[in-house]
Amino acid sequence: MTRTIHCIRHGQGLHNILPANHDLQDPPLTLFGEQQCHDLAATIPFHDQIELVVTSPLRRTIRTALLGFAPVVTRGVQVLALPLLQEASTLPCDTGSELGIIKEEFKDSAVDFSLVQEGWHLKQGTSMTTSAALLDRADATRRWLQSRPEKNIVVVSHGCFLHFLTDDWNNTINAQGTGWANTEFRSYELCDGPDNPLLIETSESKLRRGLSLCFQTAEEQQLLRKETLKTWLEWGIVSR
């Protein structure tokens, strides 16, 4: 069965407007970030196709899922918090809140926290921030998506981790540490690879972004990944 995965980066958070705010744990969206999400809800062309919304359990991603896909939530589609989608680094701004805190904050929402365990935010085990652990987590996420019965799934995650998840390493070495803009969305087909599931961006998605339909080879992406991870290690985004 072919699955379409729509990947979205969260709206602008407090940590995105000032480097000093990187010390804030699990910061919320700014007012502008919330407006970005409302704009997203008004422009997404595939609301009626979505069968599942999966989100990182951080504040900014949950709010993006609820606001950006309000028409989907309104018709009763499940919104599922998935720790595999949390951000890559150990910075406070990329570290989630304790389960009890985040559940209380969103207790009146449609978010299902059944897959979130105590200590999910501690960056241990499968949530470690080494390059190897992040690549493994991305693979585990793709396998999880492949196991789902839904054909059209929304994934709301973070700028760095989305590069791991999609294995697209273009435009990663910049001041933002990501090639994804806030509330940017891209669409992928989830395909069987030689060893592991792969996300292949659709032609429609590439055209929507104004890109050529020429696809880079796996070897070209591997070289970009190697250079990115080397730089991100120097910057402290990932660890050894």
Image (cartoon, rainbow, N blue to C red):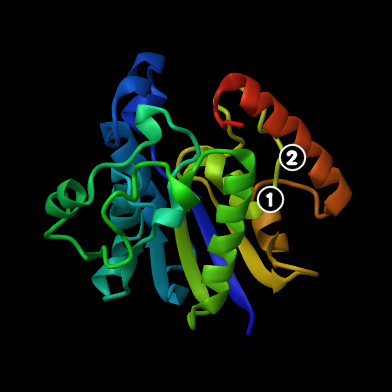
Q: Quadrant of the C terminus?
A: top right
Residue for badge 1: 167
Secondary structure category for the residue under label 1: loop
Q: Amino acid at mark 1?
A: Asp
In the rendered image, residue 35, in percent from the top left (x then y), is placed at 31, 40
In the rendered image, residue 166, in percent from the top left (x then y), is placed at 64, 53
In the rendered image, residue 59, in percent from the top left (x then y), is placed at 28, 44
Name the residue: 44% across, 32% down.
Answer: 90
* 20, above or below 72, in the image: above
Q: Is residue 224 rendered to the left or right of residue 125?
A: right
Quarter of the view holding residue 160: top right
| Residue that protrudes farthest toward the top in the picture | 20
* 231, above or below 55, in the image: above
Q: Earlier in the sequence, mark 1 or mark 2?
A: 1
Q: Which mark is residue 216?
A: none
Q: Which mark is residue 225?
A: 2
Name the residue: 41% across, 44% down.
Answer: 10
Between 96 and 191, the one lying in front of the other is 96
